[in-house]
Image: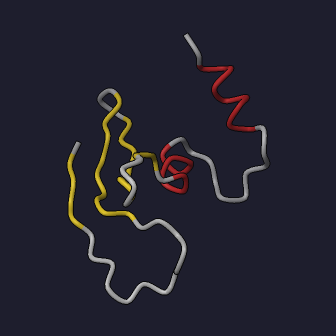
Amino acid sequence: MTTKNVSQKGSKDKGRLKATHYGTVKLGPELAFECAVLEDGRRGFIQRQMVKTLGFTEKTRSGRFERFCAKNRP
């Protein structure tokens, strides 16, 4: 995973956890997902980037991701 530090000076989102580091997780030779580490240590993927990498749009109706997973599972 590649990471970079993130400065949070002047953030207007009080009460929200902030990302302390961003990075990229590569799954196989063709898929790379952006991810983040939050202030409390939790790690996760950035939904907008994951959806984009999988070829969906922000306007994709719910349920499409589940159908995609069901279709492409081993």
Q: Could you say which is closer to the camera, residue 17 or residue 45?
A: 17
Image position of 69 with respect to 9: above or below: above
Residue that appears at 63% across and 26% down: 69
Which image quadrant: the N terminus? top left
Residue that appears at 54% across and 74% down: 15
What colour scheme governs how the chains and residues are painted in the rendered image of this protein? secondary structure
Give how far across and how far down residue 18 sits, in percent.
Answer: 42, 67
Residue that appears at 28% across and 52% down: 23
Q: Quadrant of residue 32?
A: top left
Give how far across and how far down residue 64 sits, in percent.
Answer: 74, 38
Residue that appears at 47% across and 53% down: 46
Q: Could you say which is closer to the camera, residue 5 or residue 26?
A: 5
Figure label count: 0
Give how far across and how far down residue 19 sits, in percent.
Answer: 38, 63
Image position of 20 with respect to 26: above or below: below
Q: Could you say which is closer to the camera, residue 44 or residue 40?
A: 40
Q: Is residue 34 left or right of residue 62?
A: left
Which image quadrant: the C terminus? top right
Give how far across and how far down residue 31 sits, in percent.
Answer: 38, 36
- Direction top: furthest residue: 74
